Amino acid sequence: MITQTERADVVVVGAGPTGLTAAARLAQLGVAHVVVDADVGPTRESRAALLHAATLEILDEVGVAGELIAAGVRVNRIGFCDRGRIIARIGLAGVPSRYQFALGVPQSTTEQVLVARLGALGGSIRRGHQAGKVTAVPEGYLVTGTGPAGAGAARFGISARYVIGCDGAHSIVRSSAGLGFPGSTYPSQFVLADAELRAAPGPDDEARIFTSPHGVVVTGRLPSGNHRVVATVDAGVAVPDPPGRAFLDAILRERGVGQLAAEPGVVVAVPGGPPGRRPVPGRRGVRVRGRRARAQPRRRAGHEHRHRRRLRPGHPARRRADRAGQRGRP
Ligand SMILES: Cc1cc2nc3c(=O)[nH]c(=O)nc-3n(C[C@H](O)[C@H](O)[C@H](O)COP(=O)(O)OP(=O)(O)OC[C@H]3O[C@@H](n4cnc5c(N)ncnc54)[C@H](O)[C@@H]3O)c2cc1C
């Protein structure tokens, strides 16, 4: 039974990278908010281990980009290999951003840095609080759920003017709002590992994509010196659970990547790729309460607009920025 309903301006459901960033921004702006997360602590896995320039720009707004860059590995280019032989390189120096590189940093570090930043701004996370439902009420929305974890059948209720759903791929905020999650997963399975390799598959500042008739492998160096390895495996192949050293070694050898030096730390197989969705082809946004939400963050268009003079005519970003300018966007 809910004994008391608390009130806040905003409830953030979920304290992964998205929720923590939203909460830190709200704290910076002095907006009263509550963050709830079902889990008892941040992730310990490297998961989304490559941050791109646009993400770094957003993280800079909340004051953590510098710390993350110091903790991470700069990726200055992507190298494409066919059966182990380098065939092309794409440098990131031309990215229209002040961050002309991508950053290899484990998601666990990103979350730790954001948690610390949120704390420094006076915010906190209610761990072990699982939201069950969001209901529309006259004053806004009511988030109800169970928690804190370990407190028997405790339940909580928080009403707010706004609820930000940052509760991941199986979001209850999204389902409570009646929003779908259109898209599809990839047909293949993905094996993800943080692994020590006998020899680096390329320079430390280069992420590599290895193509071969057997499938694709992506490698990138992690700050620990290990490499993040992502390998596609055909849907019909039986992947051991967990996929061990022998299985991963065979994949790396047949695709010209190299060999493991030790039993890999974390190896998981994910059908259809890391949790999320492949967008519906041609779909550029979703409708939220009658307004068309942009697939790209709005500020990105503004950013391109500010930098459009630096972009060559015909560049897709320049065309977008020109169109935005014609529509009178900032
Ligand atoms: C094993 C694995 C490997 C991955 N590898 C990669 C990769 O190689 N590259 C890549 O780009 N991405 C990868 N991802 C995906 C990446 O982790 C996500 O894209 C990223 O975490 C999304 O961040 P988020 O903050 O939106 O959601 P999440 O990180 O999923 O955070 C959601 C948070 O909401 C909380 N939550 C969920 N439901 C509720 C609820 N009802 N009430 C309260 N709290 C709730 C969860 O506890 C969690 O803390 C991987 C994911 C997994 C699981």
Image (spheres, rainbow, N blue to C red):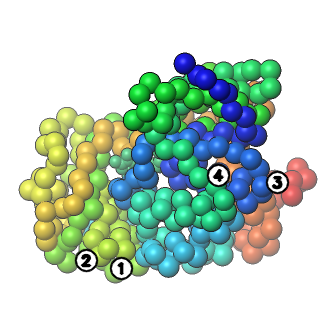
Which residue, given by chain and number where applicable, does mark 3 sit on? 324
Residue 317: horizontal and vertical position, in percent?
A: 69, 61
Q: Residues within 10 Å of mark 3 (few under 14, many from 20)?
A: some
Q: Secondary structure at mark 2?
A: loop
Q: Nearer the viewer, mark 2 or mark 3?
A: 2
The label shown at residue 219 is: none
Residue 139 location, quadrant: top right
Q: Mark 4 or 3 closer to N-term?
A: 4
List the single residue furthest toward the left. 246
Disc 4 to disc 3, C-alpha distance = 29 Å
Q: Nearer the viewer, mark 4 or mark 1?
A: 4
Q: Amino acid at mark 1?
A: Asp
Q: Secondary structure at mark 1?
A: loop
Residue 127: horizontal and vertical position, in percent?
A: 49, 44
Q: Amino acid at mark 2?
A: Ala
Q: Mark 4 or 1 closer to N-term?
A: 4
Q: Mark 2 or 3 closer to N-term?
A: 2
The label shown at residue 200 is: 2
Disc 3 to disc 1, C-alpha distance = 38 Å
Residue placed at 29% from the left, 53% from the top? 192
Which residue, given by chain and number where applicable, does mark 1 sit on? 204
Which residue, given by chain and number where applicable, does mark 4 sit on? 23
User: As displayed, is residue 232 above or below residue 201?
Assistant: above
Residue placed at 64% from the left, 51% from the top? 23
Is residue 325 rendered to the left or right of residue 187? right
Whether tag 2 and tag 1 are in contact, CB under 8 A, the answer is yes
User: As displayed, is residue 328 above or below residue 234?
Assistant: below
Is residue 169 at all visible to an observer of this figure? no
Mark 2 CB within 8 Å of ligand 1:
no
Whether tag 2 and tag 3 are in contact, CB under 8 A, the answer is no
Is residue 194 at all visible to an observer of this figure? yes
Disc 2 to disc 3, C-alpha distance = 43 Å
